[in-house]
Image (cartoon, grey):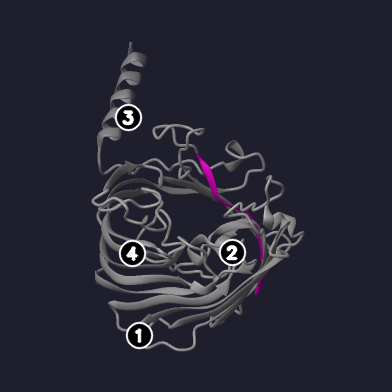
């Protein structure tokens, strides 16, 4: 009987202790990565849930990922769409240094594959790879192999998260590449170079009948190089950042276009981030080049198949970002992609420009909201221009 009372009293004491808020919390067991990964390497997950609603006052070439306004043969041809495709998930694997080298692996996906007549319906979005690479770094040097962002044109405008104003003034994309870098520890200079897969973005094949994609048929990767510097700071702890970059590559066709089967692609550009004060920053890029469809330039155009000439183009974008508070920002800016008219055929888009304004706000626990408005105009050779306004109201929850 006494033993029963002792056990009951012990149980009651344990219960009261568990309910006592002043009692010390039990120490959580340490994470055992060997229970989660084959080799016991630590993993960091990240991403966000995202929902966008779009309204265009005129018909774009794509309601979700627009790159231009179609020629307005029909007035008031508005569009509406909503989707969660930008929802993102990723993870990093970053173990302790091995042999003096820091290893890092990344995989990142979203669902921004878009339906056609032969692909899943709008409510059946499929995953796609955004980033997938292995990174090895030691001291000031690094090597990265896999799919990553282009070395050129490292910035992007604050609006149109679906297509980042590509083919409308902003260059670059993601592709398979071998990338090397040099970054001294003082942080004032960095140099990157990459051998990239030509044709990875536009999948262009101009042959009739279809043969090999033109970038692959060249038998070589293209070369991208960027040198960045932080020369001075007008605002404490916010240095001016300046980059100079270039691209050279080639595409090849089996079909001869006015006697030509090999076509060079090249670009030269600058990127700038200039803090004007604690709350106001100027950002932007300018560039020029030829045959830039695979890096989202020339309004997606590469060569003129009648003349056999590469299509040249000049463009860029700029914006002011105002940090009203640590959680609220406003932005205003514009973009332009202006191909050389003498290189174009009839009905080709000859200039793509936009002006935009918007805001985004961070709430509590990772919640963000934003609203953007873009005035967009596309001009065509020998055809009516297209112009309209695109609105995007979005909601995002980071984790």
Q: Is residue 153 left or right of residue 397?
A: right
* Tag 4 and tag 1, C-beta contact below 8 Å: no
Mark in front: 4 vs 3: 4
Let me know if residue 320 appears in the view: yes
For this orientation, the residue located farthest to the top is 1
Looking at the image, tell me whether mark 4 or mark 2 is earlier in sequence order: 2
Q: Which residues are magenta?
A: 127-143
Residue at image mark 1: 235
Mark in front: 3 vs 2: 2
Q: Is residue 139 magenta?
A: yes
For this orientation, the residue located farthest to the right is 219
Q: Which mark is residue 377?
A: 4
Q: Is residue 26 left or right of residue 296?
A: left
Mark 2 to mark 1 CA distance (whole Å): 47 Å
Residue at image mark 3: 14
Mark 3 to mark 2 CA distance (whole Å): 82 Å
Mark in front: 4 vs 2: 2
In the picture, the quarter occupied by the N terminus is: top left
Q: Position of residue 174 (x, y in %)?
A: 56, 57
Mark 4 to mark 3 CA distance (whole Å): 72 Å
Q: Position of residue 31 (x, y in %)?
A: 52, 43
Looking at the image, tell me whether mark 3 or mark 2 is earlier in sequence order: 3
Q: Total number of numbered labels?
A: 4
Mark in front: 4 vs 1: 4
Q: Which mark is residue 304?
A: 2
């Amino acid at each position: 009987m006494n033993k029963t009372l002792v056990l009951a009293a012990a149980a009651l004491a344990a219960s009261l202790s568990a309910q006592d808020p002043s009692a010390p919390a039990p120490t959580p067991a340490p994470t055992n990565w060997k229970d989660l990964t084959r080799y016991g390497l630590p993993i960091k997950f990240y991403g966000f849930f995202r929902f966008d609603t779009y309204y265009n006052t005129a018909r774009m070439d794509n309601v979700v990922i627009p790159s231009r306004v179609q020629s307005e043969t029909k007035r008031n041809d508005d569009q509406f769409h909503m989707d969660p495709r930008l929802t993102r998930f990723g993870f990093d694997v970053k173990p302790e240094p091995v042999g003096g080298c820091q290893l890092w692996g990344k995989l990142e996906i979203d669902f921004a594959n878009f339906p056609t007549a032969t692909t899943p319906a709008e409510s059946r979005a499929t995953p796609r790879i955004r980033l997938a690479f292995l990174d090895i770094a030691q001291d000031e040097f690094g090597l990265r192999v896999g799919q990553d962002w282009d070395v050129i044109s490292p910035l992007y405008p604050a609006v149109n998260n679906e297509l980042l104003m590509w083919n409308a003034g902003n260059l670059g994309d993601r592709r398979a590449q071998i990338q090397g870098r040099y970054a001294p520890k003082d942080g004032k200079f960095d140099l990157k170079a990459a051998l990239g897969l030509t044709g990875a973005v536009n999948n262009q094949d101009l042959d009739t009948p279809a043969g090999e994609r033109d970038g692959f048929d060249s038998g070589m990767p293209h070369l991208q190089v960027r040198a960045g510097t932080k020369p001075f700071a007008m605002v404490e702890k916010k240095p001016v950042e300046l980059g100079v970059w270039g691209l050279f590559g080639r595409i090849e066709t089996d079909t001869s276009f006015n006697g030509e089967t090999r076509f060079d692609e090249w670009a030269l550009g600058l990127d700038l981030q200039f803090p004007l004060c604690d709350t106001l920053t100027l950002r932007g890029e300018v560039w020029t080049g030829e045959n830039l469809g695979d890096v989202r330039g020339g309004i997606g155009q590469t060569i003129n198949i009648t003349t056999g000439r590469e299509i040249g183009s000049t463009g860029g974008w700029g914006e002011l970002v105002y940090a009203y508070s640590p959680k609220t920002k406003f932005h205003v800016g514009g973009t332009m992609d202006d191909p050389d008219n003498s290189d174009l055929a009839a009905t080709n888009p000859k200039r793509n420009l936009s002006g935009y304004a918007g805001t985004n706000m961070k709430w509590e626990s990772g919640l963000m909201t934003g609203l953007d408005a873009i005035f967009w105009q596309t001009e065509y050779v020998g055809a009516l221009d297209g112009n309209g306004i695109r609105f995007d109201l979005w909601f995002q929850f980071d984790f």
